[in-house]
Amino acid sequence: MTPSSAYLMPTYARQPVSFSRGQGARLWDTQGIEYLDAIAGVAVTSLGHAHPEIAAVIAEQAGQLLHTSNLFRIEWQERLAERLCAVSGMQRAFFCNSGAEANEAALKLARLHGSARRVTDPQVLVMENSFHGRTLATLSATGNPAAQRGFEPLMPGFVRVPYDDIEALRDAARQFPGIVAVLVEPVQGEGGVRAASAGYLQALRQLCDAHDWLMMVDEVQTGLGRTGSWFGFQQAGIVPDVITLAKALGNGLPIGACLARGWAAELFSPGQHASTFGGNPLACRVACTVLDILAREQLPQRAATLGRRLLAALQEGLSGCPEVLAIRGLGLMVGIELNRQCPELVGRALEEQRLLITVTRGTTLRLLPPLICDDAQIDDIAARVIRLLA
Ligand SMILES: *Cc1c(COP(=O)(O)O)cnc(C)c1O
């Protein structure tokens, strides 16, 4: 019996291609055709496909223990928490299974913070064009009316301002005394690959200090080396109170984390938050191995170097292309904004260039190659994109 999509809820507009095997930055479809992967499962498989160390650790842990529940201590979870705190400057971790759940935990921390301060109508400051997930709370935090349509009533308690606009933050601080936290992406990925300026994140940090807001940074897409540093916020020289992680943490095995420091790290008490699957031995051991490999191979620094190489090649090769409005990026997070809607490019890239890309916001071609690409693969990605747009 050939598989059919008839039994799936039609939540995705999928490409008519299915992959059966991968290795590093390469993928093979069920017909045996080879592709180059420039999206890494949407910033997930940063170490590439079928990484032998990850595969070995999964097999070994599966033969030992998969799950015991959070009724008991879990050594791999404790190790992972300590390792993540060491690289991020945070002090405690809560583990879950996705980016949306990590943000849910952060939003619950914001509510507890407001409740401790006796704020009766607490608000979280969020940004236009942001993306924080698809659960009702994270969808409400997301700055995309099209994604929210039909799901009203949305969760109350958000104040929205334009992104990367310091004056708008100051206005909101004056206008809304109930703000208890801010949730912000260092680079808006789904929002078209837009990086906040360092000065913006610094101003945000100052406002959070001045008004006793929790500074919560959504690093679900930007975290773990993607932007050329361990975390995007580090490039602004600030330290948030809360950060959320997911995508690349398990290299494809589902795991998310909400990390916090100081007061924010002490807000939850037993019984206030939980996840059945969150932080199980398998996911945490795999994530520890991901961190080992990122550190050992200096992949955050490598992402910075490769990102510059990719950006330079694209800027040169697309300089004569009239429909390109902007080429921007940070590390291996690159966007090419066109002067028109271009969703068809995803299918054309697959078919004509054997290249996996995404398009966000309808007009921005987005590249998120695995961090383990070699120079030649980065050059190859650039060449295929240039041919695609030629
Ligand atoms: C992908 C993403 C999320 C949601 O993660 P899921 O695992 O799909 O729930 C949240 N925030 C950002 C910035 C993301 O890129």
Image (cartoon, rainbow, N blue to C red):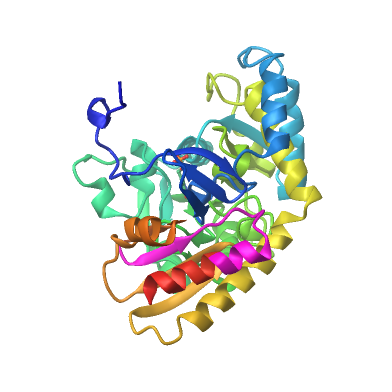
Is 372 within the magenta?
yes
Residue 259 is at least partly visible in this image? yes
Q: Is residue 95 above or below residue 240?
A: above
Q: Between residues 253 and 77, which one lies in front from this camera angle? A: 253
Q: Residue 327: where, in percent of width, then height?
A: 47, 75
Residue 202 is at least partly visible in this image? no
Q: Residue 208: where, in percent of width, then height?
A: 56, 57
322 relative to 317 in the view: left or right = left
Residue under the image location 43 percent in, 72 percent down: 387
Residue under the image location 58 percent in, 62 percent down: 332
112 relative to 91 in the view: left or right = left
Q: Between residues 100 and 309, which one lies in front from this camera angle? A: 309
Q: Residue 61: where, in percent of width, then height?
A: 70, 20
Q: Is residue 130 above or below residue 388?
A: above
Q: Is residue 123 above or below residue 190?
A: above
Residue under the image location 70 percent in, 40 percent down: 290
Quarter the C terminus occupies: bottom left
Q: Residue 117: where, in percent of width, then height?
A: 52, 41
Please provide the residue range marked out in magenta.
Answer: 362-380
214 relative to 60 in the view: left or right = left
Residue under the image location 49 percent in, 52 percent down: 35
